Image: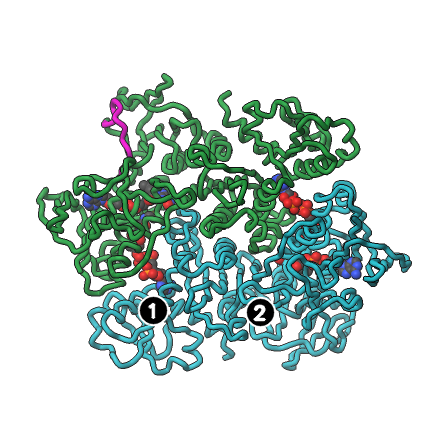
Chain colours: A green, B cyan
Amino acid sequence: MKIVIVGGVAGGASAAARARRLSESAEIILVERGSDPSFANCGMPYYVGGTIESRDKLLVSPVERLRQRYQLDVRIRESVESIDRKAKQVTIKRLDTGEEYTESYDKLILAPGAAPFRPPIPGIDLPGIYTLRNLDDADRLASATREAKRAVIIGAGFIGIEMAENLVHRGLETAVVELNTQILPPWDAEMIAPLETLLLEKGVSLHLGTQASEFRQAGDHLEVVLSNGEVLPADFVVLSIGVRPENMLAVNAELNVAQRGGIQVNAHQQTNDPDIYAVGDAIEVTEVVSGTPVQIPLAGPANRQGRIAADHIFGRDSKYRGTQGTAIVGLWKHGAAMTGLSEKVCQRMGLEYEKVYLHPGSHAGYYPGAKGMSIKVLFDPKSGRLLGGQIVGTESIDKRTDVLAMAIQAGMTVEDLEEAELCYAPQYGSAKDPVNMAGFIAAGAMRGDQPVAHSTALVQGELDDALLLDVRTPQEFADGAIDGAKNIPLDELRDHLDDLPKDQPIVAYCKVGQRGYMATRILLEHGFQARNLSGGYTTYMHVTATQPS
Amino acid sequence: MKIVIVGGVAGGASAAARARRLSESAEIILVERGSDPSFANCGMPYYVGGTIESRDKLLVSPVERLRQRYQLDVRIRESVESIDRKAKQVTIKRLDTGEEYTESYDKLILAPGAAPFRPPIPGIDLPGIYTLRNLDDADRLASATREAKRAVIIGAGFIGIEMAENLVHRGLETAVVELNTQILPPWDAEMIAPLETLLLEKGVSLHLGTQASEFRQAGDHLEVVLSNGEVLPADFVVLSIGVRPENMLAVNAELNVAQRGGIQVNAHQQTNDPDIYAVGDAIEVTEVVSGTPVQIPLAGPANRQGRIAADHIFGRDSKYRGTQGTAIVGLWKHGAAMTGLSEKVCQRMGLEYEKVYLHPGSHAGYYPGAKGMSIKVLFDPKSGRLLGGQIVGTESIDKRTDVLAMAIQAGMTVEDLEEAELCYAPQYGSAKDPVNMAGFIAAGAMRGDQPVAHSTALVQGELDDALLLDVRTPQEFADGAIDGAKNIPLDELRDHLDDLPKDQPIVAYCKVGQRGYMATRILLEHGFQARNLSGGYTTYMHVTATQPS
Ligand SMILES: Cc1cc2nc3c(=O)[nH]c(=O)nc-3n(C[C@H](O)[C@H](O)[C@H](O)COP(=O)(O)OP(=O)(O)OC[C@H]3O[C@@H](n4cnc5c(N)ncnc54)[C@H](O)[C@@H]3O)c2cc1C
Ligand SMILES: Cc1cc2nc3c(=O)[nH]c(=O)nc-3n(C[C@H](O)[C@H](O)[C@H](O)COP(=O)(O)OP(=O)(O)OC[C@H]3O[C@@H](n4cnc5c(N)ncnc54)[C@H](O)[C@@H]3O)c2cc1C
Ligand SMILES: CC(C)(COP(=O)(O)OP(=O)(O)OC[C@H]1O[C@@H](n2cnc3c(N)ncnc32)[C@H](O)[C@@H]1OP(=O)(O)O)[C@@H](O)C(=O)NCCC(=O)NCCS
Ligand SMILES: CC(C)(COP(=O)(O)OP(=O)(O)OC[C@H]1O[C@@H](n2cnc3c(N)ncnc32)[C@H](O)[C@@H]1OP(=O)(O)O)[C@@H](O)C(=O)NCCC(=O)NCCS
């Protein structure tokens, strides 16, 4: 068996390592265009920022080990230029000499990844406009940060945001430009609002809802011209506006490629040529919750797909189950995590959904050090099936997101979350874990025990007919409340039922939703038309923070 | 509807709060024998130790709030003495006056919890022998720690171990006595061995495999006489050798009570009298993995059972699904977590199982600050169904245990763990999360790709016929290896195949199991009879640490 693998990092190196474990006799050729195979892409921003001190740390499996331990024929600085499917051979170019040669294969695995998108705008090829894909890029950026004072980051996705933190670490004045009106577009805007505030607090200047229309040289520095007319000075620019599947080999070999660019494969990672597999960022995957085809570039899926391709080559039935977009990004001590569908994706797909918000503590409130977090859960309002979850906060947001991710993988409902049995000791969680709480609230909404109203609807004027009832204390109310709200503290509500209308919908709210819920129950039980403003004043503030003022 | 609830803490107060949310008109009487309802039992050791500074912090829902917000008729320092099922009434005693009165009920909820076991040994009633169940106990212990220099803890379960840490915090010389040959008996001994080492490092003296046979006064202090003849001096003693269901009310009312003492209920928490519910530590539950009846005293289940009982009273179909024993205990920065069945329980029940060990990092190794942890996963060797998981370490052990807990709840297999899609960024995890790794290894063992051998079998002489092959570096080998092992570093193995026997089983090992696995693959592929010592030298050291020397 002779296997040629194009691309030697997450998907490619994983396929190669697994293939060797499955066969001592296979000939395995790993072709990598760059200088380093098997490096930690995901660590590069932190190497640029200095948290990861040495470049060597990023070499996950150094080339000598790949050669010795895994007996791989690793060819670095060589690029696969074309595939001859009939002859079952590829043409490879030695980048240092320009020389080309052919190599035959029994099975070919394409793991070429995705390339940073470089939009065709004026000045895009000026020196000092960087992207970040491999260690050479990281070296360039790391040395640029040493001399520079001001940087502009174009694109506020994962990489852009991680770079912002790391450039601030390096003491740079940092601006971020993002066409969307929010950072981190996979998340819903209101969830991510606190991280926008954090970036501002850290001194990053945010330019949302606008884009770079031109780069130009201005003496010793660059200028980034924005579509809103602003001009930002920069010693260098980081372009991080997304990636595009490296599909040229596949396209030229007439393999099926989706419109968005991803190479199409079956569950065994086979393309339409059964001797050619494709894995990683270069492929299209099925989103598991909705069953729709998508492009989701993530390291875990790339690793597992590589492993599955190798399995299938050696006669195993391993299957990839699709990607659900479980992702996390850190930002100083904060972070945002998600799994499954966001609200905007539900809307775009026309899915019926309900959502709830909560703001629980990372562990029991009575034990010191608990930190707040914001959770949003999306679910099918009929069956209760979990559609997605998003969490933003400082502590253990990864834990609760992983639990939600497992629940989605198992096809669970919000009622399953109610009954989830999770670890509890006061340093680690709560007797009713935030995940249970999310289940209680969502199931309560589904069952009609806790009809919910939403701040998104409120700010869009959709609740104008309702009486807004603030059930917090007079002090909390005085410190800031929603315009037009009437204040009756929860503990006095039963004494003031006569002051409330039975013929007008009432939306109760408190700080996070818990007292608002209790008020809702009291009102419903007394025959009022009541709903609880999900996530309370906290979510309301997040929502209003996202509104153009 | 008139509901009387016996016991006003985890299960009882949860039932009461939920009942109120479901009905504004119900009359809800919450009877609590102690001075405080709704307190944080689980925080008490940390209050004694001073991490939780004020007693007030432990009052989760103060009595005034229960009365005002939840409109509960809370009666503290009153004890329910008997149930008259025919008349549907209970007799209640006012503890301050001794006066008794009766109260009728439509529905009765028993949430009396479980009492610390006090074995009938000489001197057990001496002053200075404490248990820890309620805030009055905690106050007594807190003030005892202020004067004392030496304490002896009897019983190394959750509470005993937490108390050990907290007494050390208070500067006390602390000894722990435990009849089992390990601390934290719910876990398997080899997993918990590192925490025994930790306790010793912190200056705690451990007396395992022995028990207190007598307490006696010796001048101004106590003496604890152990069954092994040792005598430990103590200014006070903490008795924490387990709890017994408070079942007297139920027994006297002829409700069904299991042999182990737990009140028996159906999935709606109803006893054999449909108007009487029982919840929490007082009941017997079904262990979800094995389906067997057990006693597992945990706060999360108690809270949820209370909620379910209230639901059912108000006509809902809510059902308790059983308890799987998901638990965690912290010990300084360390901790132990588990879910599902332990190996010893599998053995006791005669279940067929396989197990694997691994020692992954809490996050990507290339990002600073990753901490090691030890994971043990038990599974059905035929179907791969997950039976249990145990994790010991410092960082994010709760996260991985919760993920395993969800997998067990969903009836998942180790192959589902292989494909679990979890959060990954370098600060939070790895592209192949420890949970995925556990899945890879376990599924590899199940499929025969990675036949495993176990250190437990090795130390019991069951692998005496095998050649032990240490594939670590010569330096690692020199620093300590298993007696009789032959050292061939992994990267030289292929050159030394001729030195190895084909007719003798070979057990390969490395530090944690990963190189041993690679060696196993190479050997199997070349026709040797090879197995990998699961968890490598690390697990071997844990196992030998548990052997009586
Ligand atoms: C800065 C950064 C941070 C990231 N952070 C995270 C994170 O925190 N979490 C997460 O899940 N994911 C993260 N990712 C994404 C993750 O790294 C990718 O999803 C993953 O590496 C994709 O694996 P792959 O094998 O498909 O592609 P890659 O790992 O990119 O490997 C593809 C390789 O193929 C080579 N190649 C391409 N074409 C050819 C050819 N014709 N001939 C020879 N070689 C070729 C390329 O040089 C490249 O090295 C990050 C990515 C970057 C760039
Ligand atoms: C020190 C300590 C630490 C713990 N740590 C943890 C942990 O970290 N994680 C975890 O999951 N669990 C922990 N637990 C266990 C957890 O607290 C219990 O599982 C839970 O409280 C059980 O709830 P319950 O309602 O059944 O009983 P309880 O909460 O004990 O409440 C029962 C109440 O009923 C009252 N009562 C009994 N009989 C009568 C009567 N006849 N009339 C009136 N009142 C009566 C009692 O006074 C008692 O207050 C811990 C327990 C203790 C003591
Ligand atoms: C590292 C790399 C070369 C793949 O090598 P690999 O050997 O497949 O992966 P790992 O080193 O993680 O080891 C996993 C294997 O070891 C086994 N293993 C790990 N720990 C083990 C243990 N303690 N006991 C037994 N087996 C163990 C696993 O079962 C798995 O083998 P399997 O796939 O045959 O089941 C490749 O993933 C890579 O280049 N990664 C870096 C690039 C990247 O992923 N970038 C994106 C993230 S930054
Ligand atoms: C606190 C206690 C009185 C129960 O009160 P409770 O109101 O049921 O519980 P919580 O305060 O946690 O609130 C949970 C309820 O509020 C709702 N809720 C919580 N946050 C909410 C939010 N942000 N929005 C809407 N609803 C919310 C939940 O849905 C749930 O209601 P439901 O059961 O009707 O679905 C009881 O559990 C207790 O005494 N606990 C302390 C003792 C104990 O548990 N000891 C062991 C652990 S130390």
Residue pictured at 49% horizontal, 37% vertical = A352
| Relative image position of residue A443 (x, y in whole percent) | 59, 44
Q: Quadrant of the N terminus of chain A?
A: bottom left
| Relative image position of residue A156 (x, y in whole percent) | 39, 32
Q: Which residues are magenta?
A: A115-125
Question: Upstream in the sequence, badge 1 or badge 2?
Answer: 2
* Type of amino acid under label 1: Gly
Write down which quadrant ligand 2 falls in: bottom right
- Of B462 and A261, nearer the camera is A261
- Of A244 and B207, nearer the camera is A244
Q: Chain of mark 2?
A: B
Q: Is residue A54 above or below residue B535?
A: above
Q: Which residue in the protein does label 1 denote?
A: B448
Mark 1 or 2: the one toward you: 1
Q: Which residue in the protein does label 2 denote?
A: B185
Q: Is residue B408 above or below residue A338?
A: below
Callout 2: helix, strand or loop?
loop
